């Protein structure tokens, strides 16, 4: 029997360990930055071959402090430029705008849907300061040529890895290839803490600035209420004097111990979660082969592992099918769908930058024809077969 509750694009698993850790945090009466967040940061960074992690309240907040840190340390000026994909969640562009910088859009690869490295260099100007490649839907962007361009033009790189965790590209973990990388643990993501995100780096100075920015711009001498414990004499007096010392404008982006506890419980489960999502995705791909003349199924780059945070589908150009009709057909039968992250057609960006769809043909095709369904770990064969059955029924 089909479980209609499992036909969403994401899911939440609350394990016995999650209940135990959350209850432990409550019992400790510790909700601010404490041992669970510190442990989650340490273990998450290690799992992605990075030295430092800063947990915040969302992936967007992680991106925002990443851009702010690099702007400060690199002495970027207002209206300097940052290259972003023409297909991504709006946060990737918003965090650039919020630093008074200009997002410059680059079209995406028609198979992976990630930024097309071959189109980046012609968008680089004397004002370009950084590239933000996005690892969409669970698969890494093609980072080798991107990093070569960044080195050639002395640009910083921020990996927006909010939709990809624990997977590799050419043997390197996502998040480990750039200056700073950003992840999300929001609902429907690979690790779900309700709200949450992380910024990772292996640069100690970047890590210090990131943590300060997430805490109102506070002096790093006092980030946690534990920072003065065990200190005596002049060392303690210095901390007391600087508890309310702020050395830059910052934000209130802090997460709570409850989210840290959920993260600690879920991180060990991540390999199992990704394995099951991959199995579900392969099953859907095998069963939907008969619809390939209508639908482009997910492509897997042989140089990049795929976590399958979701299962993207794009109606082929000559299929004669309107996305609205197919999406509504599925939704009316309990199968949740989402657009594949339209960006260049968003009203505020079109108005501000006079974006024209013809200049981003791949992103425009996906905006008009792409959507995704779930393939998460709580889906069984009955749920997958129900999705397959309804897709075939529509194309009949």
Image (cartoon, rainbow, N blue to C red):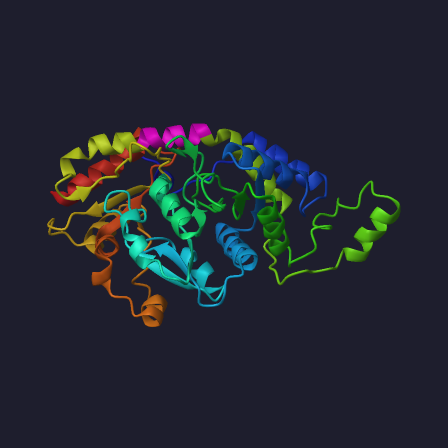
Say left or right for 162 vs 240. Answer: left
Q: Quadrant of the N terminus?
A: top left
Q: Which residues are magenta?
A: 271-280
> In the image, residue 198 lies at what x, y percent?
53, 45
Q: Residue furthest front?
A: 152
Q: Quick one: 94 or 22, which is closer to the camera?
A: 94
Is residue 207 depicted above or below 358 in this figure? Answer: above
Q: Residue furthest right?
A: 233
Q: Nearer the viewer, residue 104 or 348?
A: 104
Instruction: Point out residue 110 in the picture as x, y percentages from the top left corner.
Output: 23, 47
User: Quick check: can you spot residue 8?
Assistant: no
Locate the C terminus by quadrant.
top left
Query: Residue 265: x, y in percent?
Result: 56, 33
Residue 361 sits inside the magenta stretch:
no
Q: Quadrant of residue 16?
A: top right
Q: Is residue 17 above or below residue 228?
A: above
Which residue is located at x 72 percent, y 43 percent?
29
- Whether residue 237 sits left or right of residue 280 in the image: it is right
Instruction: Tell me the residue at 42%/40% (across/down).
Output: 11
126 is higher (above) or lower (below) than 144: below
- Looking at the image, residue 260 sits to the left or right of residue 105; the answer is right
User: Is residue 337 shown left or right of residue 11?
Assistant: left
Coordinates of residue 322 in the picture (x, y in percent): 17, 54
């Amino acid at each position: 029997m089909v479980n209609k509750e499992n036909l969403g694009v994401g899911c939440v698993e609350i394990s016995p360990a999650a209940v135990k850790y959350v209850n432990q945090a409550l019992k400790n009466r510790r909700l601010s930055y404490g041992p669970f967040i510190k442990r989650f940061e340490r273990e998450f960074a290690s799992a992605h071959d990075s030295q430092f992690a800063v947990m915040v309240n969302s992936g967007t907040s992680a991106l925002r402090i990443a851009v702010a840190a690099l702007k400060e340390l690199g002495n970027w000026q207002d209206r300097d430029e940052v290259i972003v994909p023409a297909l991504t969640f709006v946060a990737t562009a918003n965090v650039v705008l919020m630093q008074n910088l200009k997002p410059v859009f680059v079209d995406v690869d028609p198979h992976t849907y990630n930024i097309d490295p071959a189109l980046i260099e012609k968008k680089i100007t004397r004002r370009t300061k950084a590239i933000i490649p996005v690892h969409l839907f669970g698969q890494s962007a093609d980072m080798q040529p991107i990093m070569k361009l960044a080195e050639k033009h002395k640009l910083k790189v921020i990996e927006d890895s909010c939709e990809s965790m624990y997977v590799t590209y050419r043997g390197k973990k996502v998040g480990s290839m750039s200056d700073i990388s950003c992840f999300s643990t929001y609902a429907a993501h690979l690790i779900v803490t309700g709200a949450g995100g992380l910024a990772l780096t292996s640069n100690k100075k970047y890590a210090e600035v990131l943590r300060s920015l997430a805490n109102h711009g506070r002096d790093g001498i006092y980030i946690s209420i534990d920072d003065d414990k065990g200190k005596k004499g002049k060392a303690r007096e210095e901390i007391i004097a600087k508890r309310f010392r702020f050395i830059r404008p910052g934000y209130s982006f802090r997460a709570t111990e409850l989210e840290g506890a959920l993260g600690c419980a879920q991180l060990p489960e991540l390999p199992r979660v990704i394995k099951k999502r991959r199995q579900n995705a392969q099953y859907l791909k095998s069963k939907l082969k008969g619809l390939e003349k209508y639908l482009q199924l997910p492509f897997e780059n042989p140089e990049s592992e795929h976590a399958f945070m979701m299962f993207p589908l794009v109606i082929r150009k000559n299929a004669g099918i309107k996305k609205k009709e197919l999406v509504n057909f599925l939704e009316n039968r309990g199968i949740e769908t989402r657009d594949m992250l339209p960006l260049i057609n968003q009203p505020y960006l079109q108005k501000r930058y006079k974006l024209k769809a013809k200049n981003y043909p791949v992103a425009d095709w996906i905006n008009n024809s792409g959507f995704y369904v779930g393939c998460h770990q709580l889906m069984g064969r009955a749920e997958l077969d129900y999705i397959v059955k309804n897709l075939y029924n529509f194309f009949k």
